[in-house]
Image (cartoon, rainbow, N blue to C red):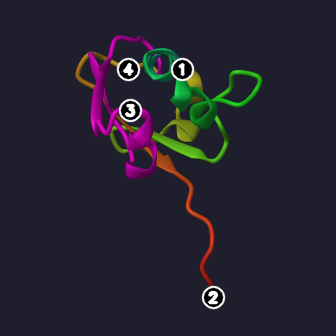
């Protein structure tokens, strides 16, 4: 089972769990599995068309899925997936 690391802002939707195991073959399936187990998380992961939200940065190990096959990126049983929400604000 792949491990998904949950960022602090989203942990309130996962019963404060920082790591979760999912059984999936792709990133899309992994996030869908996560959303099915924690329905309040779905709107934070997917847009209204079921696509991974553009402001979410999702990494497989050290690689951004945007540089791979995006949602179709394969995950193995020992893969670590990190969800990193975009951060806005600040000043120059």
Mark 4–mark 2 Cα distance, whole angstroms, equals 38 Å
Mark 1–mark 4 Cα distance, whole angstroms, equals 10 Å
Q: Dot 2 corresponds to which residue?
A: 92
Of tags 2 and 3, the one toward the viewer is 3
The front one of 18 and 69 is 18
Dot 3, crowdedness within 10 Å: few (<14), some or many (≥20)?
some
Does dot 2 land on a helix, a strand or a loop? loop
Label whose residue precedes the other's in the sequence (2 or 1):
1
Q: Dot 3 corresponds to which residue?
A: 14
Q: Dot 1 corresponds to which residue?
A: 28
Of tags 1 and 4, the one toward the viewer is 1
The answer to whether residue 69 shows anywhere in this view is: no
Where residue 64 sits in the image (x, y, percent)? 48, 42
Above or below: residue 86 compared with residue 91: above
Above or below: residue 8 compared with residue 60: below
Is 24 one of the magenta-colored residues? Answer: yes
As drawn, is 34 to the left or to the right of 51? left
Where residue 1 sits in the image (x, y, percent)? 26, 15
**Quarter occupied by residue 12:** top left
Label whose residue precedes the other's in the sequence (1 or 4):
1
Does dot 3 land on a helix, a strand or a loop? loop
Above or below: residue 47 compared with residue 87: above
Q: Dot 4 corresponds to which residue?
A: 75
Mark 2–mark 1 Cα distance, whole angstroms, equals 36 Å
Residue extent of the magenta highlight: 1-27
Task: Give the quadrant of the C terminus.
Answer: bottom right
As drawn, is 4 to the left or to the right of 68? left
Dot 1, crowdedness within 10 Å: few (<14), some or many (≥20)?
many
Label whose residue precedes the other's in the sequence (4 or 2):
4
């Amino acid at each position: 089972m792949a491990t998904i690391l949950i960022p602090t802002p989203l942990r309130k939707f996962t019963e404060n769990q920082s790591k979760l195991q999912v059984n999936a073959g792709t990133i899309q399936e992994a996030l869908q599995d996560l959303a099915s187990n924690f329905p309040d998380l779905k709107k934070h992961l997917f847009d209204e068309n079921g696509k991974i939200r553009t402001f979410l940065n999702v990494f497989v190990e050290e690689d951004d899925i945007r540089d791979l096959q995006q949602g179709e990126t394969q995950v193995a049983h020992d893969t670590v997936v990190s969800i990193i929400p975009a951060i806005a604000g600040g000043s120059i």
